[in-house]
Every structure is written in C-alpha cells, then in structure tokens.
Amino acid sequence: MSQAIIPLIMCGGAGTRLWPASREGRPKQFLRLFGPHSTFQATLQRVSDPASFGRPKRIVVKAGGRRSLQKHHHRAEHWVVVRGTARVTIADQVRTVHENESIYIPIGTVHRLENPGKMTWN
C-alpha cells in the first residue's frame, strides 16, 4: 500500500532580511517579489500535484462559526491562516492565530478551528 507524501511547508523568520520590502508584519514569503505569486503561493503550486503529494485542504469557517471537535489517529496537521483570525483549540489550550501565522496539531490530539471574527473570508 503506497501513501501520498503530505508536504509540510515551513515559513519563518523575523521578516527583516529584505527590508524595507519585508518586515515583521509583511514577511518575504507572503510578498509578490518575483511575479504574480508570492514564494509561498508558488510553493503550494509546486506541491499540489495529487499524483505525488497529498493535496493541501482549504477550510473556510463562517464568521462566528466553528468546526467540530476532531481527533486523528494517523496524521498530524499544520494549519496556516491565510486571511482573518482563527481561534484554535488543541487539547486543553486555546490560541489565537493571526493572518500569515501557522499552528501544528500533533497526531492524536483533540482539536477545533473557530472564526471569532465578524467576516467570512473566502
């Protein structure tokens, strides 16, 4: 039985290396520096071949809404907030995750995603 590779795209840093274009609130991986897409978007396109990789999922949570409490026994998850703000429950901890931030959900951990905002972002 073969399984697809599920890519983990890591972005980090203080966002000051390409100053003044990038800074803490505008990290370089989310800027359009080399064409119509950011380097993050270009990476997503490269790893979106379903024949080679597990396809990244896009989840939209309506304003004030929340997903059901979940637990996965065979996979971890890594969420990136693309727009808005998320309230994320992992086990007994609740964290606020802002736009361009990410959070890791370990295998077997109860978790939930909420949109505490007043807007639904598509």
Image (tube, helix red, strand yellow):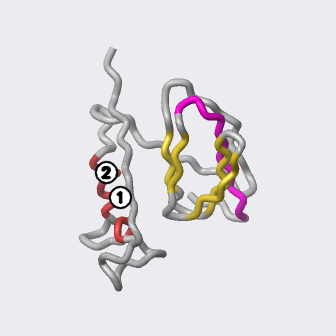
Could you say which is closer to the camera, residue 58 or residue 73?
73
Q: Residue furthest bottom?
A: 20
Does the magenta portion include 114? yes
Residues in magenta, as a range: 107-117
Q: x, y percentage for residue 8?
A: 38, 44
At x 39%, y 66%, the residue is: 13
Q: Which mark is residue 41?
A: 1
Identify residue type, mark 1. Answer: Gln
- Name the spot of residue 97 as percent of width and height, x first: 60, 59
* Residue occupying image coordinates x 49% and y 30%: 75
In the displayed orientation, state which residue is furthest to the top. Answer: 1
Distance (Cα) linking label 1 and label 2: 6 Å
Marker disc for residue 67: none
x, y percent for residue 89: 68, 46
Q: Nearer the viewer, residue 69 or 103?
A: 103
Residue drawn at the location 49% of the way across and 63% of the way down? 100
Which structural element holds mark 2?
helix
Q: Which residue is mark 2?
A: 45
- Which is the main secondary structure of the residues drawn in magenta? loop
Where 54 falls versus 88 (above or below)? Answer: above
